[in-house]
Amino acid sequence: MPLQTLTAQIGVAKQASRGTLAANPTYAHGLSSGAPIQVEPTQSMMEVTTGKRAASTIIRELVKNSAGGVSPAYIRSLGMYLLGAMGTVVTTGASAPYSHAFTTGDLPYLSFFAKGIGADIEGVRDCKIDELTLKWDGAKPLELTVKAMGTVFSYPATFSATTDDTGSDAFLVPVGGTFEVDVIGSTLASARVIGGELTIKNTVASVDASASIESADVIEGLQEHMLKLTIVPDDLAAFRKTVTGSANGSSVASSVPVGSVNLTFKENGGTGTLNVAGSKVAFLVAFPEASPKGDTTKLELAGTAVLPTGGTTPLTYTLVNSVASY
């Protein structure tokens, strides 16, 4: 019988230490798309003469193991991914709801698991999240995309998640949320947002030692925070401000103006929330294109968040849910 793809699940857990795969996933859920585990060998023909007009040997040079996929932003599982992408979490609350503030820090090692395509369970250990994206369009739920790089691939014995979000309706939506922006200051005001994207990049690289065909370790580099907000404005104030540096500017500014952002998303059918806030965001706004057929003018606010003076993180992701700790 052919294998079915709709039964696939991904699992993730924080490791106790590098080099040891977690026994089971802490969180598991389904995927909208993507392969939960990727094993990518690099192979080539050995360049040596054979006495014939053909090669005689194929060598395996390296195997890169990674994990991830696309799914709804489940409010419980999301915290593990945010910890993996940001590095640090501070949790407050004596009982539910708990508030988890994720900020920039050293990334933890994660174990990723795959189950449901075939009879086997697959795993990759020592993973660090290279990229995490939250994206939404209109009133549709937030879509989470995770890309992680790891070391050793294996076949774990079990896949028994502590929290299984497969089929859960507890995911994040923009409906009922808050979308506040100031492109050149800190006076936040509501914006008519129709879609957007938030991305955390960690510039993760592998350490490829000679003693093994698989990576020996992975290490994070510069952390970058990008955001895109598509708005339907009543004027072109956002364009003028980002270009000139002021509301009534008449020429291009020689220095980069910075603004602020405050976004809140709600749990579908629940009381949980995700807030994303930053106070030093450099925005770029392209002048809108004309349309002979006519259309609503849309502006894309493309922002890069950096550390504010005396701050510790470009953006703070604060997740409120029923999870006691990550």
Image (tube, grey):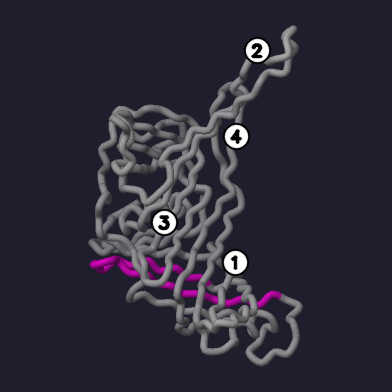
User: How far apart, in angstroms, are the residues tagged by discs 3 and 4?
Assistant: 27 Å
Expressed as whole percent of the image width and height from the top left, the position of residue 315 reads 51, 65
Label 2 amino acid? Answer: Ser
Numbered disc in front, either 3 or 1: 3
Please report the residue visible at 51 percent of the width from the left and 41 percent of the height from the top.
Answer: 149
Q: Residues within 10 Å of mark 1 (few under 14, many from 20)?
A: many
Q: What element carries label 3?
A: strand
Mark pair 2, 3: CA separation: 45 Å
Question: At 49% from the left edge and 39% from the top edge, which residue is drawn?
Answer: 66
Magenta-colored span: 256-278
Q: Of residues 106 and 156, which is closer to you in this image?
A: 156
The residue labelled by disc 1 is 304
Between 188 and 288, the residue placed more toward the observer is: 288
Q: Please name the residue that numbered disc 2 is placed on.
A: 56
The residue lying at 33 percent from left, 76 percent from top is 176
Residue 254, image x and y in percent?
Answer: 76, 78
Residue 52 pos. (x, y %): 73, 9
Which residue was labeled with disc 4? Answer: 207
In magenta stretch: residue 268 = yes
Q: Mark 3: which amino acid?
A: Leu
- Which residue is at a point 64% across and 75% down the rendered structure image? 286
**Looking at the image, is mark 4 or mark 1 earlier in the sequence?**
4
Q: Nearer the viewer, mark 2 or mark 4?
A: 2
Residue labelled with disc 3? 144
Q: What element carries label 4?
A: strand
Q: Residue 251 is drawn in which quadrant?
A: bottom right
Q: Which of marks 2 and 4 is nearer the N terminus?
A: 2
Looking at the figure, which quarter contains the N terminus? top left
Q: How far apart are marks 3 and 1 (CA)?
A: 19 Å
CB under 8 Å between discs 1 and 2: no
By secondary structure, the bulk of the magenta-drawn segment is best described as strand
